[in-house]
Each structure stands twice: as C-alpha cells, then as structure tokens.
Amino acid sequence: MIRAWTRSKAFPPAVVGLLALGLILGSAWRGAGFGFSTIDPAELGTSRTALDGSLLLTRDVDDSAETELIAIALADGSSVASIRLDRKPHRIVPTPGGVSAFVLWPDSNTVTVFDTETLELQREFALSDVRRATELSFSPTGEQVYVVDADGRTVVEYRHARLELTETRRFELDGVGPVVTNRRATRLYRAGTDSVHAYFAQTADLVESYSASLDGTVRFDEQYTALWGVSAAGNPVAIDERTGRVYSPAAGFVPRRAPAVGARAAYLSSDGRSVAFFDPRDPERPDGVVTLAEPAEFLVAAGSNEVWAVGRNGTIVTIVGGGVRETFNVATGGFGDAVVARIDRAGSFACF
C-alpha cells in the first residue's frame, strides 16, 4: 500500500526529601514533563504563536493513481515530510493527542497508522467483521474509537490504547457521517437528513433529536459548548450542547463547507474570499469577518485561536484573532483533504 518514503549542615531526611521533590518538579516544569510550555515568549517574536503538530495534506500525483501525503509543521509552515501512497485515502483521522493518524482506505476494512510528524508507518491492521470502514472517530481522551461500517448505521466501538483496538460492542445509530461525542463521551451525536440525533453512550438509546438538517458533518468547538455544521440550505448552524437550542446565524454568505472549529467556529464563504467567525457563547451573529486577498479552498483550525485558509495554488493565509497575520506557500497546490494534528504531549497513551 505504501510505495515510497521520504524523512555543611545536616538536614532531617524529610526535609531532604522535600527539597529533592522540589528540584524534580522544577526540572519537570522547565522540561515540559507535565505538559507545560518551556518556550520563552521572547524567543517567539511577535509574529507567530508556538504551535506543536502538523497539517496533513493530500495531493494527487500527475498522470498517476498515486496520492502524495504531506506534513506541514504548524510551528512555521515548513514541509517536514512527504510520502507517496498507491491510492487516495478515504479518511485521515488524527488521534486526540495528535501524535498519530489513523487512515481509512476506500472499499477496505484496513486501517493504516502513521506518525504525524515523520509520516513513518506505525501500524497496519484489518478491522475484523467490518466490511468497509466509512468513518472513524475518537472520544476526547482517545480511549474509545467509533467505526461506522458500510451500511452507514452499524457502529463498532473499540477500546483504544497504544494504537491497539479491542472491540467492545456493536450497535446501530441513525444518521450520516462520523460519530461525535461530548466532552465526557456520555453522549453520541450523528447528523441526520432532517435532524441531529443524540444518543446515551452507555446504551445507545436515543435521548433526543434536534430539528436541524445538516450536510452530514458536525463538530464541537474546543470547549464543547455547541455543535457546528452547515444546513442543507447552506447556512451556518449551531446547537447548544447544554440546552439543545438550535441557532441559524446569518453569516452574510453561503458557507463553502463545514466550519473549522477551535475556540471559535470559522466559516469560509462560497467564493473563498471571506471568513466569518462565531463565538460559541453568542452564536446568533458573527463576531468578526476577515476578507482574503486571494480565494481559499478550505479552512483548518491550526490552533485554539488560529485558522489557516488554504488556497488552490498552495498558499496558506494564517488568521489570528480578527485579522490576517502572514501568508506563505507550502507547495504547488492541488490539495484535496486536509486535517490538523495538534500535538498534546501531556495526554494518555490512548490520547497519543
């Protein structure tokens, strides 16, 4: 499947122990052993926020059935690795910790796992009793994995740890697209043709449905305040996770596709020339609109408050807060799918 690779006085023992513990904790703090940043903000300058992880892009290879998979560093936009695959992936799903990415293939039950920074092969395995995996998603901690089989209703739940999947149960959920969980994975959500369904995770029983016809993709913002999507009529939609209230805020344009979500939800206009941002705490109207000099093909949430607008010709425009910060080129363009793998090195082995 993979064709080519490219990258004085004595102190009491208790006091000594406390001093030693303080030194260890101080060292761990400085060395990020507990997940704290060790970067001096002065070293970053004023133009860039420190981002750890990769943007994974696919691009068709000319006159070939092959697809190039490219990893772009979120820290500086440089190309850090690329490989050629003998066919186009069906889905690329990073783990919640961002270190690995699970890849699904068309008409296959095979899953391939790559390192998101080096694109080195980590694992490859077949999902037993699954005909064709159409969707794969993780719980926020990475401990559960939900795979949707070819019929679109059968969901297989797996226990995940150290890139190993162990099947735990099977059930059916109405809807389309991947299974989405809330913060504690106590509820499961799927978008339907005329509503979004919420299920009790432990039993897979339907809890409630929200009257919102979406395009099949719903996403939580990073605080799990609301589910975000695009309606069948082409309008932004937000569903409050706590109350179930459905908002249809006016963006002033028809969104191009599902939003990029971090601290806010960002929608790209159909002409690719403007980005509208929505605050999950006040989703009824945009809290900012950014105009792009060149049209973008899609948006990705590179950081909590940073969005990248990726253009057809390989240009990436970084948007921070309410304006454009910088523009850079990563390749000749022609990108297909794109996902962000933001790395959290303080997570569990399942999260990685």
Image (tube, rainbow, N blue to C red):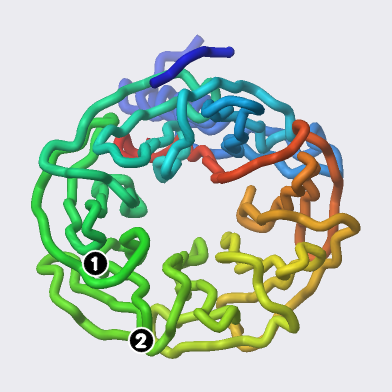
Tell me the mark number nearer the camera, choosing from 1 and 2: 2
In the picture, residue 240 is in which quadrant? bottom left
Q: Quadrant of the N terminus?
A: top left
Q: Which residue is mark 2?
A: 210
| Label 1 close to label 2 by CB (< 8 Å) | no
For disc 1, the marked residue is: 186
Q: Secondary structure at mark 2?
A: strand
Residue 310 in percent (x, y) is at 72, 48
Task: Decide: is 8 above or below 282.
Answer: above
Residue extending furthest toward the front: 63
Q: Position of residue 266 (x, y in %)?
A: 65, 66
| Residue drawn at 74 percent across, 34 percent down | 77
The residue at 71%/51% (across/down) is: 308
- Which quadrant of the figure has residue 171? bottom left
Name which residue type carries label 1.
Answer: Thr
Q: Position of residue 256 (x, y in %)?
A: 65, 67
| Residue lying at 60% horizontally and 84% vertically, measured from the top left | 282
Residue 93 visible, this angle: no
Kindly report the distance in space between the C-alpha atoms of the residues bearing marks 1 and 2.
17 Å
> Looking at the rendering, which quadrant does residue 30 occupy?
top right
Instruction: Return the mark for residue 242.
Output: none
Horizontal and vertical percent position of residue 265: 61, 68
**279 relative to 78, above or below:** below
**Viewer-side residue, 49 vs 324:** 324
Q: Please state which amino acid type lies under the numbered disc 2.
A: Tyr
Question: How busy is the neighbourhood of tag 1: few (under 14 within 10 Å), some, or many (20 plus)?
Answer: few
